[in-house]
Image (tube, rainbow, N blue to C red):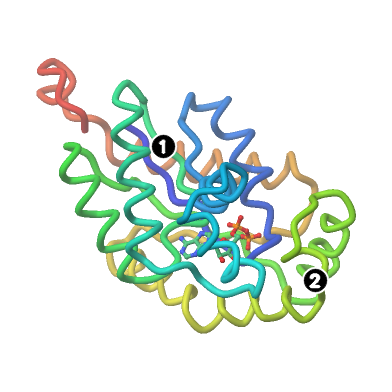
Amino acid sequence: MLNIVLFGPPGAGKGTQSQKLITHYNLVHLSTGDLLRAQITQGTELGLKAKKLMDEGLLVPDDVVIGMIGSALETNPQASGFIFDGFPRTVAQAESLDRLMAAHGTHIGCMIALEVQEEELVKRLLERGKTSNRPDDQDETKIRRRVTVYNTETAQVAGYYATQQKFHALNGIGPIEGIFGQICGLIDQHQAAVPETPAAATNGVKA
Ligand code: ADP
């Protein structure tokens, strides 16, 4: 199995690159932002609570997003791998993800971080806000709060993966295809370095 965490601040291009990666590597895309917005659209109780926090640019509680990811893993038993986008956003979420992966007989292969400076992020998100219909993309104060939340709460997750030698950073500014090529280069390098063991492959055990 190939499980990738795509990391970076809001507006770094994780969603765009995820779409390309799922096609290229045949992965299932799990975006906690998309899963939460689906709950809002369905008008669930969880969605109503999450909406208030999301609209303010604040994080939704860990147990809520961890529960959603756990269910999403259960509903995709045939997947050949996952791309996690917008998750994990806290160290507690990263630890839970490791436990969930282990429970499914697999692990996170690597984490790839897209680095983009705040002024560029604000510009991109305000532009996206013109068409995305997302309240959190339409107000500069909320956008800057999301970037601050990323810098204070989420950036520590990079350290979590760095201690496991799974962290890679890339410049997220430049042509989409060029960045995609660099991400694929890192994933391919990683897969070549950690091949699936023949025993796991023949036993049908997910590596
Ligand atoms: P972006 O990366 O552009 O901020 P997302 O769609 O990933 O957009 O997330 C939108 C909002 O959803 C976040 O600001 C946060 O409120 C909530 N959210 C998404 N993922 C998580 C998560 N893993 N933990 C807590 N809150 C989350």
Q: Position of residue 106 (x, y in %)?
A: 22, 39
Q: Is residue 198 left or right of residue 117?
A: left
**Residue 56, disc:** none
**Residue 122, disc:** 2
Q: How many marks?
A: 2
Q: Amino acid at mark 1?
A: Phe
Residue beneath the point at 56% across and 53% down = 33
Residue beneath the point at 62% across and 44% down = 41
Q: Is residue 103 left or right of residue 59?
A: left
Q: Quadrant of the N terminus?
A: top left
Image quadrant of ligand 1 equals bottom right
Q: Residues within 10 Å of mark 1 (few under 14, many from 20)?
A: many
- Residue lying farthest to the top in this orientation: 202
Q: Quadrant of the C terminus?
A: top left
Q: 74 or 21, which lies in front?
A: 74
Tell which circle, 2 or 1, labels the residue nearer the N-terminal end: 1
Distance in Å between CA atoms under marks 2 and 1:
28 Å
Q: Position of residue 26 (x, y in %)?
A: 48, 24
SS at mark 2 in the image = helix
Q: Position of residue 152 (x, y in %)?
A: 51, 84
Q: Position of residue 198 (x, y in %)?
A: 15, 22
Residue beneath the point at 65% across and 75% down = 56
Q: Residues within 10 Å of mark 2 (few under 14, many from 20)?
A: many
- In the rendered image of this protein, does residue 173 appear above or below residue 196? below
Residue beneath the point at 46% across and 31% down = 28
Residue behind mark 1: 82
Q: 39 or 115, which lies in front?
A: 39
Q: Is residue 4 left or right of residue 133?
A: left
Q: 62 or 48, which lies in front?
A: 48
SS at mark 1 in the image = strand
Q: Amino acid at mark 2?
A: Val
